[in-house]
């Protein structure tokens, strides 16, 4: 009796102490490097885990089953995260920070690649770990690279498309100026002319960067330093500001995210809409859509030709803490293989990264936007590739939002962005 | 919840003090007390360790982190390197709204950085707190008075009132986002074309309205618990003495419900000071609706250590507010409440 009385509290205390020390290992300091981790376990084979956000259209599970059937000794377990990008990001950060060996392969959003690579969490995909990128669209490869090294193999891509009303617009506009000229058609029909996503959130970074990149500007230069104090960047941003001031972009557009802008276009209130490829299916099939047979698609308008879309999509990265990197690499190669890419496209409407697939007759019949999307992605500029992406997107959002609303000039907004990004890069 | 938090006299937990069940029997009394004391401390050990793990350790860890620099980028390798000790620099930066300058040292934070939002976020947080708590107190009081009466279908009303409180905040926020959409019902109803989430004050009011809608029931229930503590005889006596309804409210209801009311206001204030999900979903912090909690979360993605400093500052602010409430305004949460005591006077 006596001993049992003592055992229980002691055991409880022991277990809790263990938990405590386990927590202690993960928290606190961020250390770079990972040089030794990156060289370990390159030949390791065995079961691995693949981590990705919610598999809404049931693409990953069939692929994992297919892999497991062929590799009974190197089975892949699928760990599904939530469908919120922020939560996926934070989940990955926590596990990488704790050096979790069970996050072997993870699906990484294009905007996180640089951050994770700079933290030393991603296995450089070179030498023994190299992945063949021939045949992949170049911007997708750039988006998976950091300082000239590939850290994440592109799996799916995404680019902006200009949707327009075929019944009202005789020929699709090729340049921004042409599109603005066509706004008289919208006025005559008493509808709004153009909209993208102009609420202050990630989508505004996408739209503002597109405006800047399409006119020859750029947010960051090759070395990752901000380069916004240029006439090109100013011209690009001023286009948006002027269009909003003139009413060519309706006033409510500053409350639009993707879905609000899609609904406005689908209910016939917009002549032009910049949005992602997912709109095509909904706008042509949803019962409430009044644009079913009037939907035109073209590349985003630029200065003299197609504009520069911001790039979306996901890549597959191998963790430096993985114990079975040889298996992990094989699985990454499996994901980017043409056969799986095709499955991603047909089953999940995910844009492939292999250029050839955009001309595949079977695929184009199913996803008629592919040729337009190819132009879009070929001309795309990855969103600023920088380990300080959260700070950069904050700077772009806040300042371009203020500029859109007329609270500051384009020049002032760009110079504030420049200063904010410089400060983020200066460290603390 | 309500019964726990209400002003019912709560017995202090027997923390460490041994409870004597039997009358002491002279010899061996000291021994018995000692063994009971040891036994009690063993029983309490798991709780104390659990609290240590989930409360003390994270707080200390956060404070330690707040005195560290955030990781900086090595320009040659392009990899992050640990920042090293920072002293109180993180705190100085937040309060003085200073950001790192490219050549070293600091500059005033340019617009578009999180550092430049500290004071506006603090102001916004307090504006939200003061306005929502005022509305919720008035409306909650009114609802509690109605619910305290006996009438047919009272339990139905009480249950119905709880619905907004029972819906998860994220869902509430999404619902209100639809309501405040440009094409949404709020604009249709008033035949207006307000950009609810597109400019400062409409955005603030959108948050305030949604928050009031959601948390008034909580307030109402806490106040209701207080109201039900007031004995009916007091009112009867007042009626016999010829007091008017207003006099009964002012001289009986208000003073007697005050302890419960103060606790309710304190709880709501502390809750409102850390408001996060509602503005985060409704406006994402745009148009000056960034609260301190939103700022902390945004900062976590840009650097843990500065975020740790900011959450410590937020903690101190909330602590000060709680202190003022308890010390000067007589909100009595822990000790035996005066409600019943005064009631018997």
Image (cartoon, coloured by chain):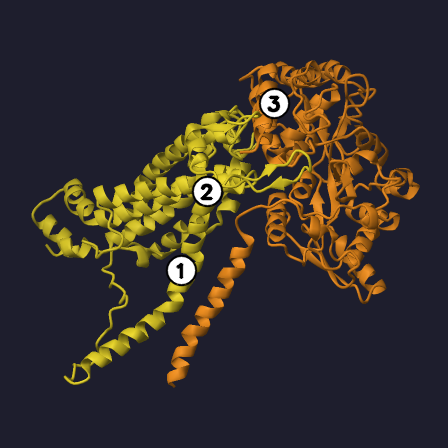
Chain colours: A orange, B yellow
Question: Who's the residue at 22% across and 49% down the image?
Answer: B259
Question: Who's the residue at 41% across and 31% down the image?
Answer: B95
> Horizontal and vertical percent for residue A83?
64, 48
B161 or A240, nearer to the observer: A240
Look at the numbered discs 2 and 1 and tell me whether their residues touch, using CB distance below 8 Å.
Answer: no
In the rendered view, does A401 fall on the left or right side of A316? left
Seen in the picture, residue B185 relative to A65 is either above or below; the reply is above
Are dots 3 and 1 on a single chain? no
Are dots 2 and 3 on a single chain? no
Considering the numbered disc 2 on the image, is that residue within a helix, a strand or a loop? helix
Look at discs 2 and 3 and give the one toward the viewer: 2
Quadrant for residue A355, please give it.
top right
Dot placed on the residue nearer the N-terminal end, 2 or 1: 1
Q: Which residue is mark 3?
A: A418
Q: Is residue A209 visible?
A: yes
Classify 10 Å Cα crowding around label 1: few (below 14), some (14-19), many (20 and above): few
């Amino acid at each position: 009796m006596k001993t049992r009385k003592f055992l229980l509290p002691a055991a409880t205390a022991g277990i809790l102490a263990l938990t405590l020390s386990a927590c202690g290992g993960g928290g606190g300091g961020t250390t770079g490097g990972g040089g030794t981790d990156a060289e370990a376990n390159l030949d390791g084979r065995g079961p691995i885990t693949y981590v990705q956000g919610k598999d809404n259209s049931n693409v990953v599970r069939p692929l994992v089953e297919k892999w497991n059937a062929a590799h009974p000794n190197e089975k892949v377990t699928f760990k599904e995260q939530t469908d919120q990008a922020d939560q996926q990001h934070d989940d990955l950060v926590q596990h990488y920070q704790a050096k979790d060996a069970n996050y072997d392969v993870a699906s990484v959003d294009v905007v996180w690649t640089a951050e994770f690579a700079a933290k030393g969490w991603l296995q450089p995909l070179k030498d023994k770990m190299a992945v063949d990128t021939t045949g992949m669209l170049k911007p997708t490869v750039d988006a998976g690279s950091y300082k000239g090294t590939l850290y994440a193999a592109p799996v799916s891509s995404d680019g902006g498309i200009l949707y327009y009303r075929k019944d009202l617009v005789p020929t699709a506009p090729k340049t921004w100026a042409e599109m603005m000229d066509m706004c008289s058609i919208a006025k005559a029909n008493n509808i709004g002319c153009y909209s993208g996503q102009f609420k202050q959130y990630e989508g505004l970074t996408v739209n503002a960067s597109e405006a800047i990149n399409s006119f020859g500007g750029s947010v960051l230069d090759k070395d990752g330093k901000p380069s916004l104090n240029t006439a090109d960047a100013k011209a690009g941003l001023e286009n948006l500001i002027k269009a909003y001031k003139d009413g060519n972009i309706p006033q409510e557009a500053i409350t639009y995210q993707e879905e609000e802008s899609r609904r406005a276009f689908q209910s016939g209130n917009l002549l032009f809409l910049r949005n992602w490829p997912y709109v095509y299916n909904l706008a042509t099939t949803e019962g409430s859509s009044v644009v079913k047979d009037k939907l035109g698609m073209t590349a985003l308008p630029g200065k003299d030709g197609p504009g520069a879309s911001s790039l979306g999509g996901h890549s597959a990265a191998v963790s430096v803490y993985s114990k079975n990197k040889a298996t992990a690499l094989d699985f990454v190669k499996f994901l980017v293989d043409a056969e799986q890419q095709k499955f991603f496209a047909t089953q999940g409407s995910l844009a492939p990264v292999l250029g050839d697939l955009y001309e595949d007759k079977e695929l184009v019949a199913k996803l008629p936007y592919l040729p337009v999307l190819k132009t879009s992605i070929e001309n795309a500029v990855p969103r600023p590739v920088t380990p300080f992406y959260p700070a950069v997107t904050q700077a772009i959002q806040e300042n371009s939002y203020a500029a859109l609303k007329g609270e500051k000039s384009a020049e002032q907004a760009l110079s504030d962005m420049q200063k904010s990004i410089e400060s983020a890069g200066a460290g603390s | 919840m309500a019964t726990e938090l209400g002003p019912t006299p709560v017995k202090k937990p027997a923390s460490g003090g041994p409870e004597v069940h039997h009358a002491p029997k002279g010899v061996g009394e000291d021994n018995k007390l000692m063994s009971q004391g040891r036994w009690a401390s063993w029983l309490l050990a798991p709780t104390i360790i659990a609290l240590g793990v989930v409360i003390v350790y994270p707080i200390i860890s956060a404070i330690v982190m707040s005195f560290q620099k955030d990781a900086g980028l090595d320009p040659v390798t392009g990899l992050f390197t640990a920042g090293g000790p920072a002293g109180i620099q993180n705190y100085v930066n937040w309060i003085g709204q200073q950001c790192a300058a490219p050549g070293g040292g600091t500059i005033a934070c340019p617009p578009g950085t999180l550092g430049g939002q500290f004071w506006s976020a603090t102001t916004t947080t307090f504006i939200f707190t003061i306005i929502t708590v005022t509305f919720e107190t008035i409306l909650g009081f009114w609802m509690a008075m109605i619910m305290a009466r006996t009438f047919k279908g009272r339990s139905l009303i009480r249950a119905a009132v709880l619905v907004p409180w029972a819906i998860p905040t994220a869902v509430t926020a999404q619902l209100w986002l639809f309501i405040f959409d440009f094409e949404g019902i709020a604009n249709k109803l008033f035949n207006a074309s307000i950009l609810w989430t597109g400019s400062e004050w409409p955005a603030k009011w959108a948050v305030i309205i949604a928050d009031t809608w959601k948390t008034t029931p909580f307030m109402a229930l806490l106040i209701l618990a207080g109201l039900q503590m007031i004995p009916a005889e007091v009112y009867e006596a007042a009626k016999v003495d010829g007091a008017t309804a207003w006099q009964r409210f002012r001289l009986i209801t208000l003073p007697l419900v005050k302890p419960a009311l103060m606790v309710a206001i304190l709880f709501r204030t502390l809750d409102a000071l850390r408001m996060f999900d509602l503005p985060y979903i409704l406006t994402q912090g745009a148009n000056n609706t960034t609260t301190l909690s939103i700022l902390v979360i945004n900062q976590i993605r840009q650097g843990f250590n500065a975020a740790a400093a900011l959450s410590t500052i937020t903690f101190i602010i909330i602590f000060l507010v709680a202190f003022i409430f308890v010390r000067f305004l007589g909100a009595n949460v822990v000790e035996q409440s005066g409600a019943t005591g005064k009631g018997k006077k």
